[in-house]
Image: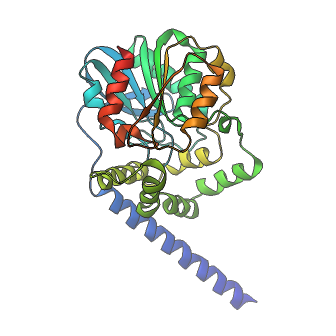
Amino acid sequence: MKKNKKFFLTLSGLALTTMHGLNCMEYNACLSKSILPTDQIQQFQWRFGTIKYRKIGAGAPLLLIHDLTPGSSSYEFSHVEEILAKTNTVYSIDLLGYGRSDKPNMTYTNYLYVQLITDFIKRVIGKKTSIVATGLSAISAIMTVHNDAEFVDKLILIHPQDLYEGNQIPSTQLKLLKLFIDSPIVGTFIYYLHTNKVTIQTQFLYEYFYRPTADMETIIDAYLEASHIGFFRGKYAYSSYLAKYGNSNCISALKNMNNSILMISGEKSTLSDTNEGNYTYFNRSIETIRITNSKNLPQLENPKETAERILDFLA
C-alpha cells in the first residue's frame, strides 16, 4: 500500500513538472516574435489594474474594443486603425485581462467591462465618443450606453454575440470549471491547450476567417503573443469567458437605445442572418451591412472595406 502511494505521488510530481516545463516552453515561444505594436502605447491607471491603449489620429474620438475570445487584444483593429485615424482620434484599448493590460486573478464580468469602458471614456477621452466593439464586447458596449448614454455617440457592432446566447448564466458546472482553470500548473496547462498555435490556427481557418490571407500567420502569432503575455495570467479572463460571466441580457437596453447603431457582419458568416434578425427585431433603427469575402473578423480579413463602411457611417 505504501509503495503504491509513493509511486502515485512520484508519478503525480513528474506529471506536474512536465506540465510546468511545457507551459514555460510555450510561453517563451509565443513571446519570441514581438508582433504586438509598441509605439504610441499609453496607460490608464484603473482601480483594478493598468490598462494599456494606443492613441493615434485627430478628430472626433473613436474607441475600438476587441472581442473577449482567447488571444483577443487591440491588435484586432491593427489593420483598420490607421485608416480610421485619418479623420478620427482613435483609441485602441486592451481590456483588463487581455493583451498588454494587467491580468489580475479575479472574475471578469460584463459589468466589470461596462465600468471600465465608462471610466475610460470619462477619464481618458473626456468627451462624447463613438464605439466600435466586436463579439461579446458588443454586449458590454450596449450596456454602457444603457447605463450612461451621455458619453456615447454612435455604436458600431462587429459580429456581436447572439442576443439569446447572452441570456446564458454561469451554472454550477461552469463555476467549477472556472475554479479548475484558475488553479496553478494544471489550470495553466489547460489554458495552454486552448491557446496553443494549432488551436488558434484552427479557429482562424474554420471560424474567424472565410479563407486564408497572406498575413494570417502573422495575425495568429499576434494572438498567441497576446494570450501569453503575463505568463498565462490570461487564463483568469478565459475561465470567466467560458463560465459565461461576460454574458448579460441586453435586450431591454437595446430596445430603449436612441443612438445610431450599425451592425457589421462578414458576408460568409453562417450566423449573419440569425444575428441580424435578432438585433433588428428589438431595435428597428439598426443599420446592417455585410463585408465581402470575410467571416467573423472582417476588420482583419477585409480591413479596407470595413474601415470605409465605418467612416461612411460616422460621417
Colouring style: rainbow
Is residue 309 visible to the viewer in this orientation of the structure?
yes
Find residue 268 and report its horizontal and vertical position in percent.
46, 44
Quadrant assignment, res 278: top right
At x 45% / y 15%, what residue is drawn? 122
In the displayed image of the protein, which residue is found farthest to the top?
A: 150
At x 42% / y 49%, what residue is drawn? 210
Find residue 306 and report its horizontal and vertical position in percent.
36, 32
Quadrant (top left, top right, bottom left, bottom right) of the N terminus = bottom right
Judging depth in this view, the residue of 222 and 97 nearest the camera is 222
Quadrant (top left, top right, bottom left, bottom right) of the C terminus = top left
At x 64% / y 80%, what residue is drawn? 9
The number of discs equals: 0
Q: Is residue 50 left or right of residue 149?
A: left
Q: Is residue 70 above or below residue 145?
A: below
Judging depth in this view, the residue of 88 and 40 nearest the camera is 88
Find residue 17 and report its horizontal and vertical position in percent.
50, 73
Q: Is residue 294 above or below residue 63?
A: below
Judging depth in this view, the residue of 289 and 119 nearest the camera is 289
Find residue 151 and report its horizontal and vertical position in percent.
48, 12
Q: Is residue 122 left or right of residue 283?
A: left
Is residue 43 visible to the viewer in this orientation of the structure?
no
At x 25% / y 30%, what residue is drawn? 82
